[in-house]
Amino acid sequence: MKAATVTLLLLASAAMTARAQHSHHADSSGAIGAADAAMSGPMSDVEMKHLELTPTRAATHDDSAGALALVRELRIALAKYRDTSAAVADGYRMFMPNVKEQRVYHFTNYRNVFMEALRFDVSKPTSILYRRGANGQLELIGAMYSAPKRMRAARLDSRVPLSIARWHKHVNWCLPPRDEKDRWLEKKNGLPVFGPESPIATKSECDDAGGVFFPSLFGWMVHANVFVGDDLAAVFAHDH
């Protein structure tokens, strides 16, 4: 099981607790960071059961021009965050600071998570993204935007063109009841029973397993890795 998946299960359980308390469990900044971190390489057919992607569309000149303009604007906005202390000073907090080896480090601004449901500001992303460089220091690579899980494709397209980037959403998760923490790592036939690597992807299957089913656990998200180069396919790749 991927290390990121263990983290996901722990965080998802906390999300369930939050929902029981009538808070915004599925859109918490921590949950968004954890779900995104799970996409750390090619995904199996089983894992793809738990991922929803926006539809592909033929790119237009305006789409490409708009995406390039976003890249240029975001590079300018992020330049001051090459030092993570500047991000912290502006209200961004590192997700899971105790986990030292993360593929992508998310510094998330809780206020921006909320505001992105109401507006799209290129200069104020949900998270600023870093990766560990050869010298051991965190290197700025880009940003992540989020949107409410019920936002329609047309509105997502107006933010980042769907012909250029595929927004993704984590769906059809079966999780253990929050009072059965010992079941987080349970397996059946060699596969996890719960979480994004489980073959269980329907409510009936989840009920049979004694779990709690979430049709859509998190909102939409997309990466804009604007410092990896100028190729738009690489900048907006959803395989993290």
Image: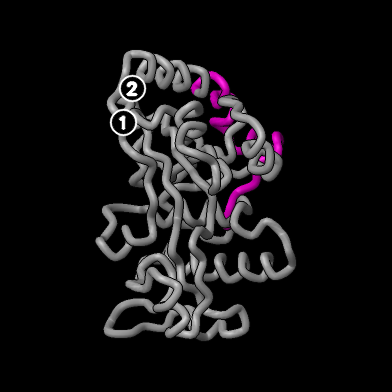
Q: Secondary structure at mark 1?
A: loop
> Residue 193 appears at what percent x and percent y?
39, 79
Q: Which amino acid, mark 1? A: Arg
Tell me if mark 2 has few (under 14), some (14-19) or many (20+) residues whose alpha carbon lies within 10 angstroms of its own. few
For residue 39, which numbered disc appears in the image?
none
Magenta residue span: 75-96
What residue is shown with label 2? 230
What residue is shown with label 1? 57
Disc 2 to disc 1, C-alpha distance = 21 Å
Asked if one can make out residue 85 in the rendered structure from this viewpoint, the answer is no
In the rendered image, the vertical position of residue 56 relative to residue 80, given as above or below: below
Q: Secondary structure at mark 2?
A: loop
Q: Is residue 142 magenta?
A: no
In the rendered image, the vertical position of residue 82 relative to residue 117, given as above or below: above
Residue 83 sits in quarter: top right
**Residue at figure coordinates x 45%, y 40% from the top left:** 222
In the rendered image, the vertical position of residue 109 relative to residue 78, given as above or below: below
> Residue 23 appears at what percent x and percent y?
72, 60
> Residue 44 appears at what percent x and percent y?
26, 61
